[in-house]
Image: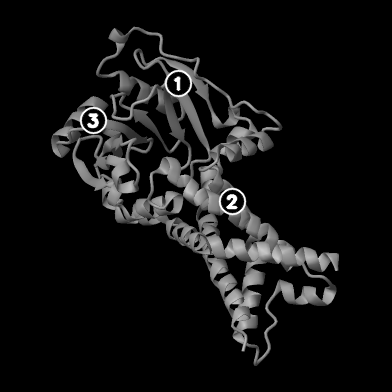
Amino acid sequence: MKRNNFKKKIRKIHLWLGLSIGLIVFIISITGALYAFQAEFTNYFRKEAIYHQEKDIHSKQVLPLKILEQKINQHTKEIYPIHWVNIPIDKNLSYVFYYYEHNPKAWHFFDEYIIYKSVYVNPFTGDVLAVYDETKDFFNIVKSIHFSFLLKSEWGAYVCGIPTLIFIIMLITGIILWWPKNKAARKQRFWFNWKDGLNWKRKNYDVHNILGFYSSILALIIAITGLYYAFFFIQAFIYFTFSGGETVYPDFSHITTTAPAYLKNESTLDTIAQKVEKVYPNAYGYSLDFGHKHLDDHEHPNYSVFVKQLDYSYHINHSLIFDENSGKLLHKHSHEDKNLGEKAIAANYDTHIGAILGLPGKIIAFILSLICASLPITGFLIWWGKKNKK
């Protein structure tokens, strides 16, 4: 009797939580599925801009970054300064410069970015190959719906985060409800055992239970890695767990620029770029900030360069700290130097979208997202079917 009463309470919790957040979970899951192959589609549709097709590049030199910046500004005639550039190690690929200005007073996605444009450039000639308004990009809009329902990302993340937290509770209660009470019941819980004449309600019930069971562990991982972007305590929990109990994340803010400002010149960024490529010649690419003032400007303790090791994933990355005036390398923090907690934090995004396993991981994430999207529908149909018994 106690067991039955316990399951009745769990069933009520599962039901009412499901009815309250079902639509939100459906939207988050569908947008997650749509975003799964974002990189593949973007690379396909932008392939003519990504590959500049310059001939005999081994006998040529890339133009200085400040010269490229001038050429881009002349082409775009934007009133805002370039924020940063993504530089590939493979010089067969175009450089990608970004205009990015964030409005801290905005309350939705389309007002949050005053400008967010990417400019693909041939680094040998300075020719602008393409300019994309990232605020109108299909996948960026899908990502914003998935992340914050097109609301301002700073607090819109909670609008998606809280239902995701509830979804985790539903996964746990769902496993409790799924758990068979005996061996006979167990046979029907692991796979479909449909006989002719079985009504749709029973089939729907089995789809909800069986797909829910097989997806639960991976769905839990996807949900927790998603909560990382909404709640600091999730970030702290992940770091604490994987670092073996460490509570303080490594801090390099004490490593700062000390050289006098007059040493900074037009070639300082190029000096930094050359040093990055010398330290990590086998990396995929890196990002350099141009150091201009911006509308939402905030203090940077030092000049840090993010280095991406792989083309398909961010989870293996390195950071370099430079004196932004002299271009001197002050500190190197490679992937190999990081503790397991740091590596787990670095892998969070790619774990969430499946990219950590390459294309097979994205396929798994896509299928899993569709299953998660189906659970509110099949769950609702179970409730509706019981409520409308003839």
164 and 42: which one is in front?
164
Q: Secondary structure at mark 3?
A: loop
Q: Secondary structure at mark 2?
A: helix
Image quarter (top left, top right, bottom left or bottom right) of the N terminus: bottom right
| Residue at (43% x, 49% y) in the render | 148
In x, y percent, where is residue 179?
76, 66
Tell me the tag on residue 165: 2
Residue that mark 1 sits on: 321
- Counting other residues with Cα less than 10 Å from the Cα at mark 2, is it few (<14), some (14-19), or many (20 or more)? some
The answer to whether 212 is drawn above or below residue 195 in the figure is: above
Decide which of tag 3 and tag 1 comes sooner along the chain: 3
16 and 299: which one is in front?
16
The answer to whether 28 is drawn above or below residue 75 in the figure is: below
Residue 35 lies in quadrant: bottom left
Depth check, mark 2 against mark 3: the one in front is 2
Between the residue at mark 2 and the residue at mark 1, the CA separation in whole angstroms equals 36 Å
Between the residue at mark 3 and the residue at mark 1, the CA separation in whole angstroms equals 23 Å
Q: Secondary structure at mark 1?
A: strand
| Residue at (64% x, 59% y) in the render | 170
Residue type for callout 3: Pro
Residue that mark 3 sits on: 81
| Residue at (69% x, 66% y) in the render | 11
Visible residue check, residue 102: yes
Depth check, mark 3 against mark 1: the one in front is 3
